[in-house]
Image (cartoon, grey):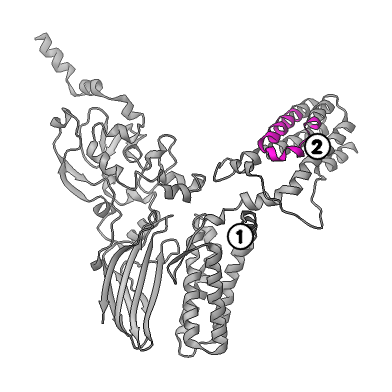
Amino acid sequence: MKKVVLTVALFGIAFGADQIILKKPPASLGKYYPPQSNKFEFVGVMHEMSGAFYGIRLNINEGKWDKALEWANRLKDAYSRAQNMVPEWKQYYKPVLADQLVKAVQAKNTDQVLKISKELGETCQKCHADNQIAIKLVYHYPPFANLKMEDPVEFAQLSPKEYMRKTSDSMKALRIFLIQGDMPKAREAGEAFVERVRGTQAVCSKCHTDKASEQLIYNKAHEDALASIERLLKEPQPNREAIFRAMSVVGQACNRCHNTHLVPAMVQEAFRK
Amino acid sequence: MILVLLIISLFSCAKFEEIVREEDLLQRPEAKRCSDCHREIFEEWRNSRHAKAWISEHFRLESENYTKNKCLSCHAPHQVDPDKEPVLRAEFKEDGVGCVACHFKEETKAMHGPLKVWSPPHPSKQDLSYTKSNFCAGCHQETFKQWQAIKTQKSCQDCHMPSLGKKDLIQKFPFHFFHLSKPRHSHEFPALKAKPEDLKLEIKENKLYITNVGVPHNLPTADQGDPKLYITVIFDTPEGQQTIRKLLSAQAKTALEYGKPYEVELPQDFKNLKVLIHRRLSHSQEKELILEKGLN
């Protein structure tokens, strides 16, 4: 019975909230992430703690208290290091609990282990609830602010946001002029739209250096759709519906990329302001 | 007689090599060490982009302060071998693509190069792979594929390591007296600029065709960098002057492919057409004019 309870106590840490508030990560955390470090030292210590917690549980459930004690000491050590890594987060830590957990394991007191594990786990949970999502979005995604994109239509260096706005404006202009039947303007907007969409590929390869990930977006269907917009617009009476269908294929590629990158980019931008 | 025999035995080749061997040269020294003898080659290399492959501010920023691991090995390779992506070097990364990276081979513990030379301070091996484009293919993979598709006889080295004629390989007194001049090729590895005659311009049925007829790879070309080509077409129409701009980017996979006409649509009634083509290298902000030509 106690085995089950111990499992629940340690793994009952979960999020539950009606609202999530994202806090700007403290500056000192930056030194454990790119571009200052590529070793992800802070994440490493988190994994150490998580592993050690599991080591205690695993060994107690198997009756190996001596091994459980080794993991309790490892947990105490990692917990102590973690609290000194980010001074701004020191208040989340209760090192006395890590100490008490070692003593409880030493005493082979399952009830105490359960009680202290829960309390110690709650210190982790509080910090994760307050910070984990923001950290993921800020440090585990590329820093979009540093990117520059070159507009193929105006030969101007733009931020990704400005570039996307121009691409989106060209797309809307194409749609509007097609609906209004103004073909010369639709052709101009369509050419700009196609050039700008093709130009986005230049920025992806800054991180996606393997061809497979680029293919998720810039695949044959996507390129065929762009080519068909170009081809249809050259016809004397362009087939409006066919152009809209091709635009929707291009739109799917936009969505795939936005679903992955737009939220982190928005959060990063908000924290920069 | 004994003295003569002693001298002969001392200066038999093997013995002589043993005496003058400079062991540190086989311990992967920094490029500066090679300049003790190969001063001219070192100076050429120092002016090259290979020398700046690691220390370039552009690379530092693009690699996010050297944290993008995938980029690093070609910017400070341990050993460059034909057709093989290198691994990252542990020492003297600031040398970038330095002397040892290309010339020292772990397998033979010797300096390899295209020439047959006797070089007592370090063992040398003639290796003709240095004259072939495959040698560059481990890092310049995309450009190599483009070049390969064209099936030209011209190698990477023919253009990017131009011949300097016969020159001394070393400039160290008194050893340079023992060497004959050898065919030398530039170690500046120039990123050559296309010449106007490399691009053929034609107008047919209200279309401008631009064809790369002189450079045996895409323009622009790169593996991870993003050099660009700016095509500006200016012409008069009854409504006034108009400009068409086309941006070709290695990373956007748009380029003037060798022998394949690039098409620019023109209006029905244009005149006084002028084409300007500029390029911008990955590491530079400067746009350099390649061609300015009027077509009527």
**Magenta region includes residue B238:** no
Counting from the top left corner in percent of width and height, residue B190 is at 28, 52
Occupied quadrant, residue A113: top right
Identify the magenta region. Answer: A71-97
Secondary element at tag 2: helix
Distance between mark 2 and mark 1 Cα atoms: 34 Å
In the rendered structure, which amino acid carries the disc numbered 2? Leu
Amino acid type at circle 1 is His
Which of A53 and B285 lies nearest the eye of the viewer? B285
Question: Quick one: quadrant of the C terminus of chain B?
Answer: bottom left
Q: Is residue A64 visible?
A: no
Residue at disc 1, secondary structure: helix
**Chain letter behind tag 1:** A
Extreme residue toward the left, this view:
B1
Pick whichever, B10 or B160, lies toward us.
B160
Q: Which mark is residue A261?
A: 1
